[in-house]
Image: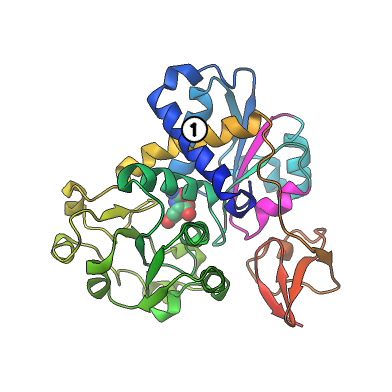
Amino acid sequence: MIDLDQLTVPEIEELIHLANDIRSNPWAYRESCRGKIMATLFYEPSTRTKMSFQTAMYRLGGEVIGFDNPGNSSVSKGESLKDTITVIGGYADLIVIRNPWEGAAAAASLYSGVPIINAGDGGHLHPTQTLTDLVTLYNEKGRLDHLCIGLCGDLMYGRTVHSLIKTMTRFEGNSFVLISTPELALPQYVKDIMDAAGCKYREVSSLEEAIPSLDVLYMTRIQQERFPSRESYESQKGVFVLDNKKLLAAKKDLKILHPLPRVDEIEVSVDDDPRATYFRQTVYGVYARMALILTILRGANIGVPKKAKTSTHPYHCTNPRCITQTEHYLPNLFTEAGGMITCVYCDGRTLI
Ligand code: NCD
């Protein structure tokens, strides 16, 4: 499970329904993964994603191994991703991986004998957060289509934003308002996906201007750790702050989501507004991940990569944040179209 585009829309809907069934009847599922082991390999900090995965597995009756500080594992001795994954695949039934390099989960999947779940690969994708967001929207808005979705903050490095937009373009009638500074605008490849799906979107630099039209407002943290320099981060921080005054112009049934952690982009006073959905969203995340773990460990044939026409090339990916920059043994895998190659790991594009 590297990217939700590996699943059909009915498969995604099935996961949402399973998550809701688990939510209504948790006791019916408490032995479902008895005897199974999930490994959580977190090369990057995490609170919710890691702990909601762990909670999910324990609530299904399974067990968890792993590390959340690669400094305490053989990674600190220079072990490659390939070797770590090959070994852990012999211990666990399922591997959940978060890594700062874009495309790391796809790379891991080349060497794993067990299913891999991408829990965030650098600034690229975060499919299980999207599954969480979908379960949240389905329950709180009652639908996943015909929504006007505003996404605000770090649209450049925000992996949750990329995964969410990619998935929401697949449901009918959704439109997007991209609220960011030009420096943190959405990557072109995600815009191209919206265009290809025929989704309407507009780019604005004012949260006030965007708010009245929105059904959903997805706030994000400025991703400090992904900026090339301290100065470039300092120039972007604190630009967008949601407060009660701005919410006066919002719809009564707006839903405010945030993958969390929050820094300063939503004032604490907003937490008491009934439209603030972000803490309930963290609970939906446990059920979403229970549904995913259960479905994968039942052996359902989901998540088969659908990247057609993949070929190796003499070229190298030019994205400095791509996993191929650090794990040099990885085959160069690209798809090719219109004089451009796209890296299969990170979606980075290079002109040829
Ligand atoms: C997000 C992440 O790690 O990408 N958090 C999460 O998984 N819930 C968002 C963030 O770190 O800002």
Q: Name the image colouring.
A: rainbow
Q: What x and y, as percent, mark residue 271?
A: 21, 49
Query: Looking at the image, which is closer to me, 88 or 36?
Result: 36
Report the side of 37 relative to 152 (left or right).
Answer: right
Q: How many marks?
A: 1
Query: Looking at the image, which is closer to me, 141 or 226?
Result: 141
Report the side of 334 relative to 162 (left or right).
Answer: right
Q: What x and y, as percent, mark residue 256?
A: 29, 54
Q: Which residue is mark 1?
A: 18
Q: Quadrant of the C terminus?
A: bottom right
Q: What x and y, as percent, mark residue 131?
A: 48, 46
* Mark 1 residue element: helix
Query: Looking at the image, which is closer to me, 238 or 53?
Result: 53
- For the point 46% across and 61% down, the residue is 161
Q: What x and y, as percent, mark residue 182?
A: 41, 80
Can residue 104 be found in the magenta stretch? yes
Which region of the structure is painted magenta?
91-110
Report the side of 336 relative to 180 (left or right).
Answer: right
Q: Is residue 51 visible?
A: no
- For the point 30% across and 72% down, the residue is 239
